[in-house]
Image (cartoon, helix red, strand yellow):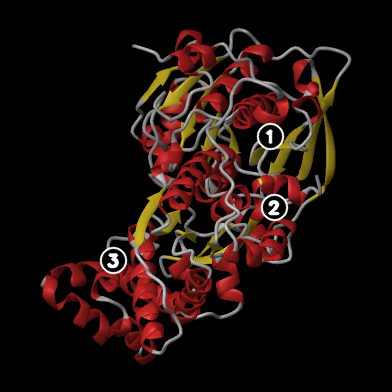
Amino acid sequence: MVKSALQVARAAYKPKMPKALYGSVKIEEGAATQSVADQEEVKKLFPNTYGMPTLKFVEASEKANYPAINVGVILSGGQAPGGHNVIAGLFDGIKNLNSGSRLYGFLMGPGGLVDHDYKELTGEIIDEYRNTGGFDIIGSGRTKLESKEQFDKGLEILKKLDIKALVIIGGDDSNTNACVLAEYYKAINAGVQVIGCPKTIDGDLKNEMIETSFGFDTACKVYAEVIGNIQRDCNSARKYWHFIKLMGRSASHIALECALQVQPNICIISEEVEAKKLSLDDIVTDIAKAVARRAADGNNFGTVLIPEGLIEFIPAMKVLISELNDFLAHHQDEFNAVPKDEQLAYIRKNLSADNSKVFASLPDGVARQLTLDRDPHGNVQVSLIETEKLLAEMVGNKLAEMKAEGKYSGKFASQVHFFGYEGRCAAPSNYDADYCYSLGYTAAALIGAGKTGYMSSVRNTTAPASEWIAGGVPVTMMMNMERRHGEMKPVIRKALVELDGAPFKYLVANREAWAVGTEFVYPGPIQYFGPTEVCDQPTITLKLEQGK
């Protein structure tokens, strides 16, 4: 395989780790835990893995003897930069426990476990993928592990390969499934530990024990570079408003972090839209007023950052989508049988009066996008809804109205962008390379300690890596009950942007100045080599959250 100069140089990079992980470790147990909500329901569903303590690894003076162990690993869900380093850290970690340990990768996600599709990951293979982006070492998939039949089928291959521990690298849904699997295997005394690792570029898998999900740092830096380039072009040509949609279906963490890095004229935060009960027209009017204010100063250009999931946070739209999800979950075949040109009328007829009215008010293109196939979790695929085009078009219409009323005299031309896949498989930043390797190594330590139903946790990451704190958090601690496919299910609660948190407050304190002025910042590309203040910086979000 031909390698770029950067690939060759990155292969030699040695990730930094918490000091405690370099030698032998022992566990410090924290207090017993409970789920974030719905304690009785969650406890009833997870009698064997509920209430376990948080864990912290500290240096031990004497080295313990561990037997050789076979471990399986699965990459689940969408790609995120650093996944290969989680696997590299896991490999090195189990080899450190006992050099006879072996690692097997299940191919193309959880489906590989059920279908018995796997390969052994040798040192030679691992070395090819250290510090690289992507999930191509074993591939990823979105098969949900949720039925007894799947668990039993998976157990067949685990027993055949003598695998005693399984590491599932994924987001909130994947780690929920990992916990269900851990509970089942413990209940039947299968002798298989299950450990999770927190992955998602969206940044919505976090709490006091999981500071950030891996890939968020790199993805935001990739997007911020491109947005910065657009802003420089914008400030050079001075004739376009750029509407930029950013990945993040359930939370606006990416949009917020990118805004903190690039200082755009406008950044919409979905959680604020919901809290203030703003309508689509409210959002459009706010943007149009900002455009008019800048035009009054002779600036007919600017940037607007839009979170991918915005449409679901507009209260009237959220209620509509919820009913649509429920309806299509039970009538998908019937809907598919309706002729295309009659589908929108069919939906309108079957919705409640209020939702039918909202649905009818949408442009046909957007209404049709809301009826497209659901994702595996039964939710509308918001990345297919062209919110950036919708807003650009509606702002243009609003400005035409304002011009007719004599409230606007500028020129408005728009460009639209959606940045998503560009950031998912980027070569990881130093932060993500170090963080992911540490997560994998910590997962190995949790396996060595005989734990199951835990997620690998690495904290204090705004400090130098040697001061990071490695440990584990019970997955049940993060759970609550939510409606999925029309049924109540245990799921890890998504972490939304906190409107009283330091990152959002910083945006609020500065957005007026950014809206009126042109205070663009141009972050440039990810730096891998050079001074620490350039190469090893965590996200602005993390620094603000920790008061750094």
- The amino acid type found where label 3 is placed reads Gln
Label located before the other in sequence (3 or 2): 3
Pointer 2 with pointer 1, Cβ within 8 A: no
Residue to which mark 3 is pinned: 369
Expressed as whole percent of the image width and height from the top left, the position of residue 455 reads 64, 40
Residue to which mark 2 is pinned: 477
Within the image, what quadrant is residue 211 found in? top right
Q: What distance separates the C-alpha of mark 3 from that of mark 1? A: 39 Å
Residue 430 versus residue 37 in the image, above or below: above
Residue to which mark 1 is pinned: 537
Q: Is residue 375 visible?
A: no
Expressed as whole percent of the image width and height from the top left, the position of residue 54 reads 77, 43
* Front residue of this view, candidates 466 and 284: 284
Q: What distance separates the C-alpha of mark 2 from that of mark 1? A: 29 Å
SS at badge 3? helix
Residue 350 versus residue 186 in the image, above or below: below
Residue at the spot 48% in from the left edge and 51% down from the top edge: 235
Within the image, what quadrant is residue 119 found in? top left
